[in-house]
Image (spheres, helix red, strand yellow):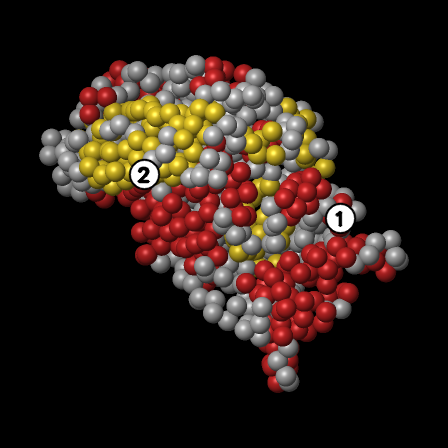
């Protein structure tokens, strides 16, 4: 803390000194950004430039105190602002005012299929980061959901590159409207936690460009992201935090990225590659990114004294150094040196309400046989809530996204809150999973220690289920190792802690059973035909229980849709069936472009629940899709329109999905690919026309022989669906 106070004082007095004289260009915000950058750059000493591009603590870089350029402070996201840790340690700093709003996980945000919700999310979390005076929010994540066993899938936006790309852009703009840089991660091909620091990904160029890069490209070219985080893994044998192909050739070369490439903590491994291969700002070297680390190692980072020594000895020049410094200076001028930067706000009721709204729109009703949901509180006298996840805190754990939340409403408490005295709510544990409620020094939630044997817990739950009008089992995964947790992949597709037996026994005891799956991943459901109602509940943050309960009783009509496929078994997942997961020293993406629903379509596999699936408490009818031009040129845009009507008795929202099919191609293409979507809100009986416009990009594939995107003339089909498997109608058109 003393170090930080001295640094702040130095910045203040330095700024006062330069302002007392004629104002330098770099402090004049009326001047063009590039002139300010160049002016500041030419005033910096070699030593100041070197200090500027590497950490001085676990989460900060020093800035340039002599010139009044403040420190650069980063914070983990992407679901909330990480609690403060000590200057040089992972241990908690012991602050009493760093309890944040916990927002829903990004899988939930993606499940809203609502760009307005993404904007609200980014704006709200950006306000919290700004209030804590952070320059860089380490998020959002857009790595593709390749396998349901990836322990970090809950931090990402699903299996489809178009959906992830469309949802990440408003998030970035929302964050950066607060003068805080979004740091989009993890670039790229970071699709597993097993051997994450060493595994080399082998993937063909077509899959790289069509599946794994588009969301990052959208983040850069449409979202204007001010920073990008490299990933731990390798591609073409080079670490991705200093990878010539990804960072220089593609990111900065092909896409024209002007921002800062930040290393992941522990992601820098080589003496020369970080200098030449695109890394700009080095953090966390010699740590594992979570726990271990070398104390006061900062001067010996690869971009620190070793780099300075190489320059002074003539082994390397300063061209690369100046490029790195320019990029970090640009980020500083956009954040801490922006005089119009707003002040932000922290852990406010407005942010909690925003989080609840996002959660409500992201919850997915997967199955609702016999219209068991919503719960009719006028006819229900006793509700049995069963399952550890009904009482377990989920804002702690999971790795670097673990939070010290201001509060977290459990599903059980949320149900009690909304039911009130209208019905009796009773609870039984049912099973024991992980009783811990702490991570990295943050202890949050009840002590869940349980000494009773599994048989006794199950018997208690079954007895309770028999006495209830309706049973709500809240289970799924948690944020413990080998589940939804950074650093670990899942070991199996099945539910942990013998939950399948509990669910089956409850289904025998009471036919009115609701299964609420709290997870960021798909899970196997061998009992799916025994359970009439299934809800995907995600990790919903601070307002978890209130959001979930409002959907269960019908105060909110569910409108979320799945951002990834639920396969029946792991054998139906392409990373298992065709490719490798997790591989050894190398992992081969042999499935190529056929990820998620693309693979299910190709193999004609019926998923447990398809990509884009989600039910409602009302019903919708679709009219015939029309096209504004049946024949188009490559430079034309084409608009498809369809009437959608709410044919039920409740107000609700439907997500209209547009897929494009190339009917004849010189290269093998997926049966269809998502290229547009729109969430439309309809009152009972209301009808609206939904129009979606696409351009040449939507018709193109990546030709790896030409290393170019190609829109091949010929016949195409526009497919309107309520999911990837629920096709409503089609229309043909021709690209001339």
Label 2 crowd (10 A; few <14 / some 14-19 / many >=20): some
Query: In the rendered image, which quarter is residue 422 located in?
Result: top left
Earlier in the chain: of badge 1 and badge 2, it is 1
Residue shown at 54%/73% (left/top)?
Answer: 30
Q: Position of residue 482 (x, y in %)?
A: 53, 30
Report whether 26 appears left or right of 547: right
Residue at the outermost left position: 378
Q: Is residue 217 above or below residue 1?
A: above
Q: Position of residue 544 (x, y in %)?
A: 34, 42
Label 1 crowd (10 A; few <14 / some 14-19 / many >=20): some
Q: Answer yes or no: is residue 522 visible.
A: no
Q: Is residue 323 above or below residue 635?
A: below
Residue shown at 51%/40% (left/top)?
Answer: 215
Report whether 283 appears left or right of 597: right
Q: What's the mark number on residue 567? A: none
Q: Nearer the viewer, residue 561 or 55?
A: 561
Q: Which residue is mark 2?
A: 691
Q: Position of residue 284 (x, y in %)?
A: 66, 49
Which dot, 1 or 2, sits closer to the camera? Answer: 2
Q: Position of residue 629 (x, y in %)?
A: 36, 34
CA gap, disc 1 and disc 2: 47 Å
Residue shown at 39%/27% (left/top)?
Answer: 733
Q: What's the mark number on residue 276? A: 1
């Amino acid at each position: 803390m003393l170090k930080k106070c001295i640094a702040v004082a130095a910045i203040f007095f330095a700024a006062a000194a330069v302002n007392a004289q004629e104002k330098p260009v770099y402090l004049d915000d009326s001047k063009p950004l590039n002139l300010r950058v160049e002016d500041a750059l030419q005033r910096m000493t070699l030593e100041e430039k070197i200090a500027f591009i590497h950490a001085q603590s676990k989460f900060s870089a020093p800035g340039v105190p002599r010139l009044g350029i403040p420190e650069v402070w980063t914070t983990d996201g992407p679901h909330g602002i990480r609690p403060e840790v000590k200057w040089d340690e992972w241990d908690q700093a012991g602050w009493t005012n760093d309890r944040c709003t916990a927002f829903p996980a990004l899988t939930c945000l993606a499940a809203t299929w609502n760009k307005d919700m993404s904007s609200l999310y980014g704006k709200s979390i950006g306000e919290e980061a700004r209030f804590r005076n952070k320059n860089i929010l380490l998020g959002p994540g857009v790595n593709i959901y390749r396998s349901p066993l990836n322990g970090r899938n809950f931090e990402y936006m699903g299996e489809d590159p178009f959906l992830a790309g469309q949802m990440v852009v408003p998030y970035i703009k929302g964050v950066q409207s607060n003068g805080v840089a979004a740091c989009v991660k993890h670039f790229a091909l970071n699709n597993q936690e097993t051997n994450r620091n060493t595994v080399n990904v082998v993937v063909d160029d077509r899959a790289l460009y069509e599946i794994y890069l588009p969301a990052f490209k959208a983040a850069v070219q449409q979202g204007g992201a001010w920073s990008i985080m490299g990933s731990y893994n390798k591609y073409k044998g080079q670490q991705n935090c200093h990878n010539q192909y990804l960072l220089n050739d593609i990111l900065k070369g092909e896409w024209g990225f002007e921002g800062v490439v930040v290393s992941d903590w522990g992601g820098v491994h080589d003496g020369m590659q970080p200098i030449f291969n695109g890394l700009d700002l080095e953090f966390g070297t010699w740590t594992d990114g979570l726990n271990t680390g070398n104390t006061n190692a900062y001067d010996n980072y690869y971009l620190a004294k070793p780099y300075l020594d190489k320059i002074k000895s003539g082994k390397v020049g300063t061209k690369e150094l100046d490029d790195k410094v320019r990029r970090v200076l640009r980020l500083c001028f956009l954040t801490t040196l922006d005089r119009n930067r707003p002040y932000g706000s922290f852990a406010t009721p407005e942010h909690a309400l925003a989080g609840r709204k996002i959660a409500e729109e992201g919850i997915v009703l997967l199955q609702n046989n016999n219209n068991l949901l919503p719960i009719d509180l006028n006819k229900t006298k006793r509700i049995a809530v069963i399952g550890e996840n009904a009482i377990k805190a989920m804002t702690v754990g999971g790795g670097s996204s673990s939070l010290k939340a201001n509060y977290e409403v459990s599903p059980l408490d949320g149900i009690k809150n909304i039911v009130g005295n209208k019905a009796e709510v009773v609870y039984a544990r049912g099973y024991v999973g992980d009783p811990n409620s702490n991570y990295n020094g943050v202890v949050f939630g009840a002590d869940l220690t349980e000494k009773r044997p599994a048989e006794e817990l199950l018997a208690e739950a079954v007895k309770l289920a028999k006495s209830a009008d309706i049973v709500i089992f809240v289970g799924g995964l948690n944020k413990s190792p080998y589940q939804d947790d950074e650093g670990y992949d899942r070991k199996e597709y099945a539910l942990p802690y013998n939950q399948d037996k509990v669910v089956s026994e409850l289904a025998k005891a009471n036919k009115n059973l609701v299964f609420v799956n709290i997870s960021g991943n798909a899970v196997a459901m061998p009992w799916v035909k025994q359970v009439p109602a299934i809800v995907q509940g995600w990790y919903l943050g601070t307002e978890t229980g209130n959001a979930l309960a409002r959907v269960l009783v019908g105060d909110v009509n569910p409108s979320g849709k799945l951002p990834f496929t639920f396969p029946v078994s792991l054998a139906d997942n392409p990373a298992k069936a065709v490719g490798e997961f997790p591989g050894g020293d190398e992992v081969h993406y042999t499935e190529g472009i056929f990820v998620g629903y693309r693979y299910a379509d190709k193999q004609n596999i019926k998923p447990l629940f398809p990509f884009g699936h989600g039910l409602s408490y009302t019903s919708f009818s679709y009219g015939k899709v029309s096209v504004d031009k049946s024949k188009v040129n490559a430079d034309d845009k084409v608009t498809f329109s369809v009437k959608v009507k709410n044919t039920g008795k409740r107000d609700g929202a439907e997500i209209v999905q547009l897929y494009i099919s190339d009917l004849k191609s010189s290269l093998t293409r997926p049966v269809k690919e998502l290229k547009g979507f729109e969430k439309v809100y309809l009152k009972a009986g209301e009808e609206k026309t939904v129009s979606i416009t696409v351009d040449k990009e939507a018709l193109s594939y990546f030709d790896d022989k030409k290393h170019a995107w190609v829109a091949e003339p010929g016949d195409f089909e526009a497919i309107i669906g309520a999911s990837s498997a629920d096709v409503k109608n089609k229309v043909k058109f021709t690209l001339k």
